[in-house]
DNA sequence: TTCCATATATGACGATCGTCATATTGAACG
DNA sequence: CGTTCAATATGACGATCGTCATATATGGAA
């Protein structure tokens, strides 16, 4: 190979990054190859020099979006823990924060995409399933007391469902009210002894 | 009007009914006018004799799907109550049943569509919001004890999130195991005194 | 039976979709 | 300074999208 390999890889990464945002904004089927390439500053024809198919890009994009969303969430949790919050309270208040309500493109992709999952290709389904499992494990590690792994699955379901409904109500007063109500209620019922 | 009005109305209803199933199977954007008309036994050109636009059909379809899904659910709940279940246990075991897991086209449309909501037109968003409110109210009426309306919103979020994740795992062993685990856990934590 | 309003069908429009064959660029080497 | 080959751009393909103007079929009223 004559030229530096970093050149093509950088473009590849930029396309994946753009797609990772696009699928959270518009859904699996909401954006086309042309949209993504244009947003990445390229023309749509050169797409197949980087990916075997649109589906292959989507698989990479969901993995990228999952890792990125998880990192952002964990960072937000750790900031809250540093200010004295328990891991569970930090998790709930971070995932159900007004910030997360509004930042669809950079937030948790599961809440946006899980409903579309059953209609996707096997490869996309498998990639999404891995992200769901990772999310449940992240929740489990922050449950108070000696809760069962069982409980992590319920809490994960509640967090995802809550954020979806709040977003359905909009990034406005009704949506934020729904979110703060769920935040308070979840913390009260899971850690009745403390705030 | 010379001819009987029931003729056009019957066709209209058949189109809406077909669309109500189609949007649950393939999502808001997953089906086109041509698909729906063909499934209803008509050609796509005559569509605009019945609806002002595709969006107008979608609004009617989500309302139809919401009412139909709710009726099916309530009927399933009442059958369980007749066999001695409490209203809450009947609700949880009906919404999180293996049957509901598999019957996407005729089940609760909220679990399929809420994730796509923020991207839809104002009219579709408003129609979907009404169905979400109706669902929360249906849950509230079946909570045990003197729970707050607050709690209905959390339970509704949990039910919707759980069904979505279970469907993401598939209508197979993993999905059904997830569902039965949530069923048991929810009933145990909300009605600790009884089964 | 004849007529006519209504319901449905036909076929076309511009746009956009995923895909790909081919042309052009651009940067490192001899 | 050319040469060469990887990286990107161009432009086209068949299909499908929502929409609509227009033509045909249908069925009750006369």
Image: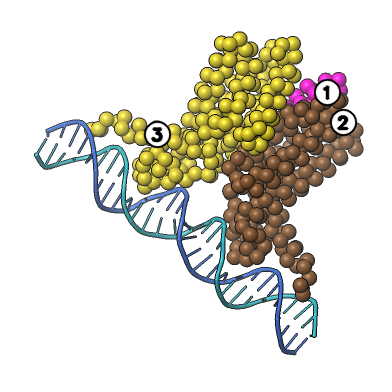
Chain colours: A yellow, B brown, C blue, D cyan
Task: State the CA–CA distance, disc 3 to disc 1.
Answer: 51 Å
Would you place residue C1 above or below residue C23 in this image? Answer: below
- Whether residues under marks 2 and 3 lie with C-beta atoms below 8 angstroms apart, the answer is no
Please state the horizontal and vertical placement of residue B107, each as a whole percent of the image. 73, 44
Circles 3 and 1 on the same chain: no
Q: Of label 2 and label 1, which has the lower sequence position?
A: 2
**Label 3 belongs to which residue?**
A14
Residue A2 location (% of width, % of height)? 23, 33
- Give a yes or no on whether discs 2 and 1 share a subunit: yes
Subunit of label 2: B
| Magenta span of residues | B180-194
The Cα–Cα distance between marks 2 and 3, rounded to whole angstroms, is: 54 Å
Q: Do the CB atoms of the residues marked 3 and 1 lie less than 8 Å apart?
A: no
What residue appears at the point 58 percent right and 48 percent down from the top-left corner? B29
Give x and y (percent) for residue B110.
Answer: 69, 40
**Residue B89 in sight here:** no
Where disc 3 sits, the SS reads helix
Q: Is residue B147 left or right of residue B34?
A: right
Q: Which residue occupies 67% across, 62% down?
A: B50
* Residue position marked by numbered label 1 in the rendering: B191
The kind of secondary structure element at disc 1 is: loop
Residue under the point 85% across and 27% down? B144
Residue at 60% x, 52% y is B31
Which label was assigned to residue B86?
2
**10 Å crowding of disc 1: few (<14), some (14-19), many (20+):** some
């Amino acid at each position: 190979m004559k030229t530096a390999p970093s050149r093509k890889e950088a473009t590849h990464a930029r396309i994946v990054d753009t797609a990772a945002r696009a699928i959270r904004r518009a859904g699996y089927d909401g954006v086309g190859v042309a949209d993504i390439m244009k947003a990445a500053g390229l023309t749509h024809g050169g797409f197949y020099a980087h990916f075997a198919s649109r589906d292959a890009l989507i698989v990479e994009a969901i993995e990228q979006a999952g890792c990125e969303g998880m990192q952002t969430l964990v960072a937000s949790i750790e900031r809250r823990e540093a200010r004295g919050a328990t891991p569970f309270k930090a998790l709930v208040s971070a995932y159900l924060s007004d910030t997360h309500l509004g930042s669809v493109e950079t937030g948790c992709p599961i809440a946006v995409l899980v409903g579309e999952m059953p209609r996707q290709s096997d490869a996309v389904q498998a990639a999404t399933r891995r992200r769901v499992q990772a999310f449940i494990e992240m929740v489990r590690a922050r449950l108070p007391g000696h809760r069962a792994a069982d409980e992590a699955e319920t809490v994960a379901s509640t967090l995802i469902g809550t954020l979806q409904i709040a977003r359905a109500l909009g990034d406005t007063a009704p949506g934020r009210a729904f979110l703060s109500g769920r935040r308070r209620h979840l913390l009260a019922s899971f850690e009745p002894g403390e705030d």
